[in-house]
Image (spheres, coloured by chain):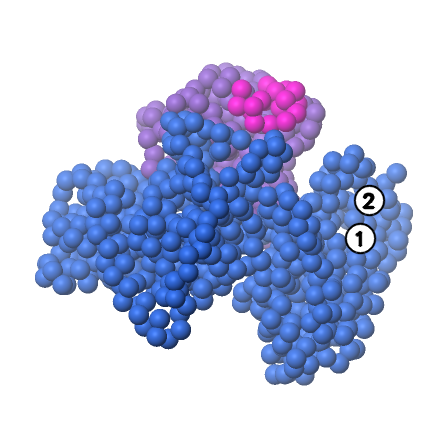
Chain colours: A purple, B blue
Amino acid sequence: MRLSILLTGVGGHGILTAASILGKASLKAGYNVLVSEVHGMAQRGGIVNCNVRIGDVYSPLIPKGRADVIISTEPIEALRQIDKANEKTLIITDVNPVIPPTIYFSKTSYPEVEKVLEELRRTCKLCAIDAGELAKKAGNVLAKNVVLLGALSAFDVLPFDSRLLLETIAESLPYKDVNARAFKLGEEEVRKKYKGINMRKSQTGKGNEIVLR
Amino acid sequence: MEIIEAKPGDKLLLLGNEAIARGALEAGVDFVTTYPGTPSSEIADTFSAIAKYLRKKGKEVPFYFEYSVNEKVALEIAAAASFCKLRALTCMKHVGLNVASDALMTYAYVGCRGGHIIVSADDPYCHSSQNEQDNRYYAIFANIPMLEPSNAQEAKEMAKEGMEISEEIGLPLLLRTTTRISHTRGVVEVGEVGKPRKKGHFEKDPMMVTVPITARARHPVLIEKMEKAEKLSEKSRFNEIIENGGGFGIVASGVSVAHSLEAINMLGIEADILKIGFTNPLPKKLCEKFLGEHDKVLVVEELEPLLEHRLKQIAFDAGLKVEIYGKDSKHFTRLYEYTPDKVADAISKLLNLDFSPSENKPSIDLPQRPPVMCPGCPHRASYYAVKQVAPKDVIYPTDIGCYTLGKYPPLEIADVLLCMGSSAGTSCGFSKATDQKIISFMGDSTFFHAGLPAVIDAVHHNHDCVITILDNRTTAMTGHQPHPGVAEGGMGEEVKAISVEEVVKGLGVKDVHVVDPRDLEKTKEAFRKALNYKGPSVVVCKAPCVLLDLRDKRRKGEKIKKYQVNQNKCRKCKVCVLKFGCPAIFFDGEKVRINEEICTGCGVCAQVCPFNAIEVKE
């Protein structure tokens, strides 16, 4: 068993926290796990990437085209990591753009979100949700990392029960009720949105095919 | 607090840095010193957290810990503990060892008594550093043993066993990590926490005073010690041959071992790996054996071709016919960090294999997302004020800290950076070399670390420059560690806080201004005066790091003010966005708005607005 999950997004979105929860839950389930982090710039609005690798893996870094899942708290940040994806990769992303504050001094403008999602859809298997809105509904916009973990748990990807993930969230984070709601809202959103849709695009690949639980 | 409370056999998910802390605890470390620096900071922060936790519980802290003023002092403090037969750990980032190197070079001559591990956390790719120097050369330069872990478990083991090795040989030991070891969490099975010795006793020995005659006598002793170290390396469990079969071999150390294993797995080939963890002195006999058993060997190491050249030496001396590939053969670069793809690519080129990883690329041009100063950061206010009053062609020497981000638009207020404290040193030089005005910037922690001597030089030679000290009451960039300017130490104890302005006055600076940069008018006035003063001026811009300020306000239950743009008053001059550049202010079509979710209520934008259109939201 080997599973590679890339978590990405903007500093301050709780990416390191989400990665660490995935890591702790994997350890509890008895798997080997590596979580590679980036520190220092996390609270300063830059890009944050975290590689979570579970099972029979050696390197802390996911090789090109070998991420099974990419979870992103921001749409263009998901696209920025597309070299890590293949046609079977499941991409779970929040649809809310975070415009870089430096955009006014940049030659490149922020692209239309729909175009970004379309490209992700063309390249991989895309699950795009409004995690920001769901987090607000759960009680705190900061809980969108947990919404995305809930969304992940709706797919048959992790080698352990999603309850273990929820349990780890409860142990690791304050605001238990908010986070439990956020997790559930993420999970339900995916079930609602992707019910009956066959995410099994590729017929050639083996293993790690994405289906709803 | 599992890092201290975990029982032998427990499996924890630990950062490489936390694993090093646990390993040192298992070795019974008595003394821990540091100056914070990414990617090393969490080692010391772990000790700080343990100390505070135990003190809060009314328990005795089994070690002494401090955030020292700089790496050199940190090393000297811990060396003294080692001289008293205590066990010591000193942690720093790679460039920190440059600062400590003066002490290190002669420390090797004098030797240690209690085990002493010096951690150098290197940063290939400069994730958060000003260079990517390869600190393995320090082990060779100083003639001290070196261990390099390839994962978190090994990081723990090496911190523990390294202490024994150091004590046995009588030399400080360099434990060298890189970012991907320091900042990767892995599963670590822990052992028992060791018993510290607590108090030592210094027994005098005239051979510890390195006057020339003693130094000459100590040098051969050092060489003898390293001969003993080579024997330990030869039988160390950290050096091993991972056999898979085949005439092709790989030699690797550190994270490159992990990338190599991943690469041969991806390529589906068989290759033996000589994994070297005890990298100085090299286990010559083991290397010779491995080189003798293979026709082709690829050396996988980030940065400089250090192992590669030493292996070539060994092969030459032994008259071996083996072909050794790596950087000289252009299979690898000396730049940046490696990845499994880079290693797989090198292997496939060498063995003529087909390797074509995914070439997925975004077809849309994506805007960059560089890190920026936080909303409400007092540095932005300081910079904005300076830009309002500074004449054209002024030189802005900058320094190491969050404030280096002033380099980017719209402020663009950083012209040159070398190292900690260099803003003040280069200011002195620019003042004599040009007729340009000079306004330099350094943080409070940086001032204490390495800024002081240059300020003395400025006073002594009357260099005409404005030295700004951005005093945000913390070492912010590395995770808010304390420094000599604050009254709480690393163990949560009360310590003497040293005032930046009193120090500079004491050094003889006559023109000293202390301002809260969030008051733009007063700040501008201070800089105007300082620019008009002939000779060195110091402006201390004092306001707490906004992240700490918000944390304190939330703890006290204080309401955080929010600002908004009064659209009736806004004339769309765009100064707030295009000149001030707070990330909370943005264009919504033609309108300027403030993102309430991230506004910290500092109110500086309201002072920036020429039309008083930015108001407190009631």
Image vertical order of residue B90 relative to residue B428, above or below: above
Q: Nearer the viewer, residue B338 or B217?
A: B217
Residue occupying the point 74% across, 64% down? B501
Image vertical order of residue B298 relative to residue B268, above or below: below
What is the count of numbered marks? 2
Q: Which amino acid type is shown beneath numbered disc 1? A: Cys
Res. A106 visible in picture: no
Residue where numbered disc 1 is placed: B605
Q: Between disc 2 and disc 1, whose residue precedes?
A: 2
Q: Position of residue A131 (x, y in %)?
A: 62, 29
Q: Position of residue B17 (x, y in %)?
A: 46, 43
Q: Nearer the viewer, residue B65 or A22?
A: B65
Q: Which amino acid type is shown beneath numbered disc 2? A: Tyr
Residue where numbered disc 2 is placed: B563
For the residue carrying disc 2, how many other residues have a C-alpha within 10 Å: few (<14), some (14-19), or many (20+)? many
Q: Position of residue B563 (x, y in %)?
A: 82, 44
Res. A141 visible in picture: yes
Q: Chain of mark 2?
A: B
For the residue carrying disc 1, how many other residues have a C-alpha within 10 Å: few (<14), some (14-19), or many (20+)? many
Residue occupying the point 34% across, 75% down? B213
Image vertical order of residue A33 relative to residue B507, above or below: above
Q: Secondary structure at mark 2?
A: strand
Q: Quadrant of the C terminus of chain B?
A: top right
Is B429 part of what is drawn in magenta?
A: no
Q: Is circle 2 on the same chain as circle 1?
A: yes
Residue occupying the point 61% across, 72% down? B454
**Does the residue at mark 2 contact the one at mark 1 (Cβ under 8 Å)?**
yes
Q: Secondary structure at mark 1?
A: helix
Which residues fall within the magenta stretch? Answer: A167-184
Is A174 part of what is drawn in magenta?
A: yes
